[in-house]
């Protein structure tokens, strides 16, 4: 069953969306519908994946374990020290 939906948004957004839909040879309604389906499906899959760990990007996975960092390492403090050192040299 199809139901009418009224959306309110800026004129420029509507104009650009209509241009995009025309270029894709699709109606604006079907674009919005497909987007909302994708968002809803992504939300469902995100909820299902909460119990399982996220997969790392293969490039990031290769780097995993390369560095040995102490458990008490505070990267914010270390970054602050590096920035202070760098910018104090410039003065």
Image: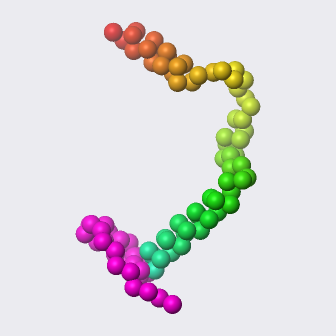
Foreground of the two, 47 or 77 = 47
Residue range highlighted in magenta: 1-29
**Apparent side of residue 14 relative to residue 51 in the rendered image (left or right):** left
- Rendering quarter of residue 28: bottom left
* Residue at 25 percent of width and 69 percent of height: 11
Residue that lies at the very extreme toward the bottom in this rendered image: 1
Relative side of 57 to 7, left or right: right
Please tell me whether residue 46 is drawn above or below residue 2 in the rendered image: above
**Image location (x, y in percent) of residue 75:** 57, 24
| In-image side of 78 versus 21 (left or right) | right
Image label count? 0
Q: Tell me, yes or no, whether the highlighted magenta stretch contains residue 19.
A: yes
Task: Tell me, yes or no, if residue 25 can be seen here.
Answer: no
Vertical arrangement, residue 67 with respect to residue 48, above or below = above
Q: Position of residue 87 (x, y in %)?
A: 39, 15
Quarter holding the C terminus is top left
């Amino acid at each position: 069953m199809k139901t009418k939906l009224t959306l309110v948004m800026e004129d420029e957004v509507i104009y650009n969306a209509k241009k995009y839909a025309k270029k894709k040879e699709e109606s604006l309604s079907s674009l919005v519908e497909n987007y909302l389906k994708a968002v809803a499906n992504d939300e469902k899959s995100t909820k299902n994946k909460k119990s399982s760990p996220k997969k790392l990007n293969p490039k990031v996975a290769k780097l995993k374990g390369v560095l040995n960092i102490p458990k008490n390492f505070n990267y914010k403090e270390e970054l602050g020290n590096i920035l202070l050192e760098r910018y104090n040299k410039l003065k």
